[in-house]
Amino acid sequence: MRRIYMKKNIANCLSTENITVVDAMKKIQDNARGVLYIVDENGKFLGSVTDGDIRRWVIQTGNITGTVSMFLNRNAKCIMESQRDIADNVLNTLGVRSLPIIDDNGFIKDIVFDEFYSSAGLNDCLKDVPIIIMAGGKGTRLYPYTKILPKPLIPIGEVPIIERIMNQFHKYGACDFYLVLNYKREMIKSYFMDQKLPYQVEFVNEEEPLGTAGGIRLIDRVFTSPVIVTNCDILIEADYEDIISCHKQLNNDMTIVSSLKNISIPYGVLETGENGKVLSMREKPSIPTMVNTGMYIINPKFIDWIPEKEVFHMTQLAQKLIDSQKKVGMYPIDDNSFLDMGEFEEMKRMEKRLSDSR
């Protein structure tokens, strides 16, 4: 199996242990290699952090404000420059997807990667998972576009956003889609009836707006496996196999796919103490937080918790589960993996991102 060496782009895969959790996740997303190799202030090899390490840390602790030093793998494997010719054998023997190559002083001189690393993960893990897409809204934030087209049919490039969403799920084997429709629903139906699709689509008519969850109760089917519910204006570029596995392994009743974001505050922020004393100031800080992407995995029995013929939202269902001591978990993804077209600026970002990835 051929290997890829990263000597020319090695900086993309390196960082120091004081990099924040959010920034580390972003850098891993940017390098598309699933790993950062961590060096000290002098550039000497310390260990590694993978996207899986970050995800497990955030899920287990909920802590997104710290640095990777809290969970750095200081026993990460490496080989010496003198062993370069046996890199293939070491990769195979250790069962790892990458190895740093270091010199006698501990500096990383190169990194060798398995050629097929970036394509790992696609399979039929969603073959038996129903996908419900809530596509009934008017998309008022996208006026005047949505005065002509329903939001699900607004093209990103040459493909409507809803079809891009469905194609992304289909890459992982999904073949069972339910579209909950209201606004301009006949236009959406006509579009799909004219397409030759590799999956089944069932249309669910919502006569009155019922929120982001209410329309689910109109589906004439009893589900027996976890169901994915998603908005029609977001695209999640993540490992869906890992998302489903995480939901099941953690015994979650609901899992909310969440995006790690740095929210920039456009003002100087004061930290104050007693009697109005200013203790410190930070100019336009970025605050890490987790946001709801609008994609959920829910166990089928809790669909009955959605009231019939009432306006009801997925966030209300999540809170209802939390209040009832059910297990609502989250699955963190990087900001770059969360593409949103709910507003014009975000839609332009999505168009550029998908155009650059072609």
Image: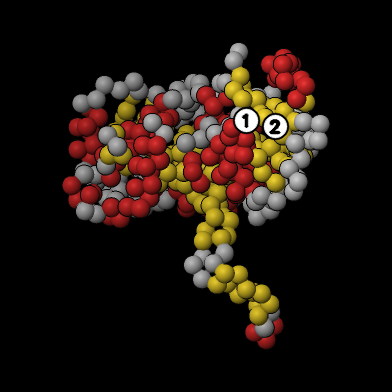
Image x and y of residue 163, in percent:
32, 33
Among the 4 quarters of the image, the one containing residue 155: top left
The amino acid type of the residue labelled 1 equals Lys
The residue furthest right is 104
In the picture of the structure, the residue carrying the numbered disc 1 is 7
Q: Is residue 332 left or right of residue 147?
A: right
Q: Is residue 215 left or right of residue 14?
A: left
Among the 4 quarters of the image, the one containing residue 103: top right
| Position above or below: 87 against 324 | above
Q: Which mark, residue 109?
A: 2
Report the label total. 2
* Residue 63 visible from this viewpoint: no
Q: Quadrant of the N terminus?
A: top right
What residue do we see at 68% from left, 77% from top? Answer: 279
104 vs 160, nearest the viewer? 104
Image x and y of residue 253, in percent:
57, 40
Q: Quadrant of the C terminus?
A: top left
Label 2 neighbour load within 10 Å: few <14, some 14-19, many 20+: some
Considering only order in the chain, which callout, 2 or 1, is on the residue closer to the N terminus?
A: 1
| Position above or below: 325 against 173 | below
* Residue 39 visible from this viewpoint: yes
Circle 2: element type: strand
What residue do we see at 75% from left, 36% from top? Answer: 107
Q: Which mark, residue 219?
A: none
Instruction: Please report contact status of discs 1 and 2: CB closer than 8 Å, yes or no.
Output: yes
